[in-house]
């Protein structure tokens, strides 16, 4: 049995609904803009992939605003982190597309929730500072559940009344791909018939600047080229916020409801580098094995893949490792699938990355296109043998391999198939 | 005539808790702040306490004390007059 995707919701730097995200992907419109953090114009972080239409910069929820149409009651919002607001907006879109009412999830033991976020460094800092100011005598009663990693599962699980399973994943930028993978497994094992998979991250000084101190971020100020995966000039990733939600279901469950499958989650695989806390294995050894395992799980070979949705974040080491891994897997067999890195447009929204790419794959199938690499000038030498279109290719892919890599050498890959091309 | 401290407190309550659909003048002097018509609970009360401490230089040490202080706007005004920094009281 292979689960199918029946709903997708987007709150991203390139759009807050499916139509605008698709337009941005088709036309190569980026969502990166100039930013200044902590009132310090001298910081080497000049741009970010910002989420538009929300005001969630303050640590006080009463200051927050979000697009109209989504009702978040007071007793819910005060347990949320800023990225939890993105998450609920994305889940609502995904449920609507899947034709599900929130009330249908509540108390249903066959529905599970699989979440990914890094928590909220901003709220954690704010709450701890308040507690220390009171010399430990007082603290925000919702401080823990709103700020630690797990805040999404705590809050969304309670808000939607999820009873099948509620869990969270913390493998950094591979987290939401892990969330999706284990959701797929629980469906395949017959434990559940439906899962909501969600990744969300906020974008603020506390979430992003620590990455500058790891020298992981681009120092460029031009939003048009700061994020340029696979380019010789790439100098680090551009941070981003957002949330993407997926509804996946057992095909029989989707069919019973008359829900239209948008894509098949054909298989997934993971492997680790065993190499460094933060840097990728120089030849992408773990990523290559993860890609092979995903293909094997899907019952496919490299020749069945039309498009690789690359993790490539525009870091010198990470992109090189991924390029080499893709080239070895496909190039060694004389294959040249198209490879696209959408982080050139979105920036890198950390744990959201995997489900964001999965959501883009769904749009690629329905819209008949494959996103290119619009900020690519001169490809790095490691990309030799890779087919890296600059512009979006107006052709429908049948099957996509989508990559994710996170700190600690986590690599998680998924294979998705278009309707009519299902492998299950 | 409204007492300036009472008026300031009502304004602070509306501002801090972003109350919608109610003006400061509409908050009664003697109604319980928590569990009353404003639909505030103990988590709202905590936010209010943090703000009041900053504004008036008071220290509301325990939740027992907070309950007493926030019994009503009138009780709060009396509490602040008794313990607050006189230079910070509105005139």
Image (cartoon, helix red, strand yellow):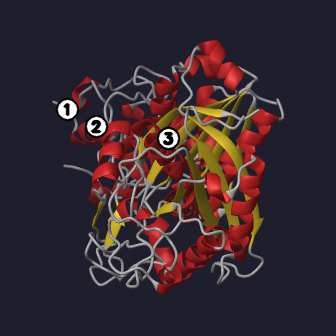
Query: Can you name the residue that lies furthest to the left here?
Result: B1
Quadrant of the image occupied by residue B2 = top left
Do marks 2 and 3 share a subunit?
no
- Tell me residue A87's x, y (percent): 50, 42
Which residue is at 31% across, 36% downward? B14
Distance from Cα at disc 1 to Cα at disc 3: 62 Å
Is B86 situated left or right of B51 in this image? left
Residue of label 3: A362
At label 2, counting other C-alpha atoms closer than 10 Å, the crowd grade (few under 14, some 14-19, many 20 or more) is many
Seen in the picture, residue A322 relative to B75 is either above or below; the reply is below
Seen in the picture, residue B24 relative to A337 is either above or below; the reply is above
On the question of residue B46 being in view, the answer is no
Which residue is at 35% across, 44% downward? A22
- Tell me residue A285's x, y (percent): 72, 76
Q: Nearer the viewer, mark 1 or mark 3?
A: 3
- Tell me residue A148's x, y (percent): 62, 55
Circles 1 and 2: CB distance less than 8 Å? yes
Residue of label 1: B2
Q: Chain of mark 1?
A: B
Label 3 element class? helix
Say the numbered circle drawn on residue B6. Answer: 2
Do marks 1 and 2 share a subunit?
yes
Distance from Cα at disc 1 to Cα at disc 2: 7 Å
Figure quadrant of the C terminus of chain A: top right
């Amino acid at each position: 049995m292979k689960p199918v995707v029946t709903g997708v919701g987007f709150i991203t730097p390139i759009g807050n609904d499916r139509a605008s995200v698709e337009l941005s992907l088709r036309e190569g419109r980026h969502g990166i803009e100039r930013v200044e953090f902590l009132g310090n114009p001298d910081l080497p972080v000049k741009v970010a992939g910002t989420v538009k239409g929300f005001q969630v910069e303050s640590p006080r929820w009463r200051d927050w605003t979000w697009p109209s149409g989504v009702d978040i009651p007071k007793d819910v919002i005060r347990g949320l982190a800023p990225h939890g607001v993105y998450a609920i907006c994305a889940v609502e879109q995904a449920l609507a597309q899947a034709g599900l009412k929130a009330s249908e999830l509540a108390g249903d033991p066959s529905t599970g929730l699989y979440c990914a976020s890094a928590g909220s460094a901003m709220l954690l800092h704010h709450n701890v500072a308040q507690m220390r100011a009171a010399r430990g005598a007082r603290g925000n009663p919702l401080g823990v559940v709103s700020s630690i990693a797990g805040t999404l599962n705590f809050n969304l699980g309670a808000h939607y009344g999820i009873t099948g399973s509620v869990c969270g994943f913390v493998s950094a930028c591979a987290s939401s791909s892990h969330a999706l993978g284990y959701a797929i497994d629980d469906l395949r094992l017959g434990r559940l018939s439906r899962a909501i998979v969600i990744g969300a991250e906020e974008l603020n000084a506390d979430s992003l600047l620590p990455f500058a101190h790891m020298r992981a971020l681009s120092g460029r100020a031009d939003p048009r080229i700061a994020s340029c995966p696979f380019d010789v000039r790439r100098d680090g990733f551009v941070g981003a916020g957002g949330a993407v939600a997926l509804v996946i279901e057992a095909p029989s469950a989707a069919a019973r409801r008359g829900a239209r499958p948008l894509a098949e989650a054909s298989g997934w695989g993971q492997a680790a580098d065993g190499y460094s806390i933060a840097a990728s294995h120089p030849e992408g050894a773990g990523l290559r094995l993860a890609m092979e395992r995903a293909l094997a799980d899907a019952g496919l070979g490299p020749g069945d893949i039309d498009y690789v949705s690359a993790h490539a974040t525009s870091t010198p080491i990470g992109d090189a490792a991924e390029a080499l891994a893709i080239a070895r897997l496909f190039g060694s067999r004389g294959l040249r699938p198209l490879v696209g890195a959408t982080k050139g447009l979105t920036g890198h929204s950390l744990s959201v990355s995997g489900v964001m790419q999965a959501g883009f794959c769904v749009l690629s199938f329905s819209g008949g296109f494959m996103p290119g690499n619009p900020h690519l000038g001169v490809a790095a030498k490691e990309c030799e043998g890779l087919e890296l279109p600059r512009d979006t290719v107006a052709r429908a892919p049948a099957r996509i391999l989508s990559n994710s890599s996170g700190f600690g050498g986590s690599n998680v890959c998924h294979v998705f198939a278009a309707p009519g091309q299902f492998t299950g | 005539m409204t007492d300036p401290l009472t008026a300031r407190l009502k304004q602070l309550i509306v501002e801090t808790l972003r109350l919608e659909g109610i003006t400061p003048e509409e908050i009664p002097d003697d109604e319980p702040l928590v569990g009353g018509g404003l639909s505030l609970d103990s988590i709202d009360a905590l936010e209010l306490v943090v703000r009041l401490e900053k504004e008036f230089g008071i220290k509301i040490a325990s939740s027992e004390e907070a309950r007493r202080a926030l019994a009503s706007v009138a009780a709060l005004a009396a509490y602040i007059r008794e313990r607050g920094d006189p230079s910070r009281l509105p005139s």
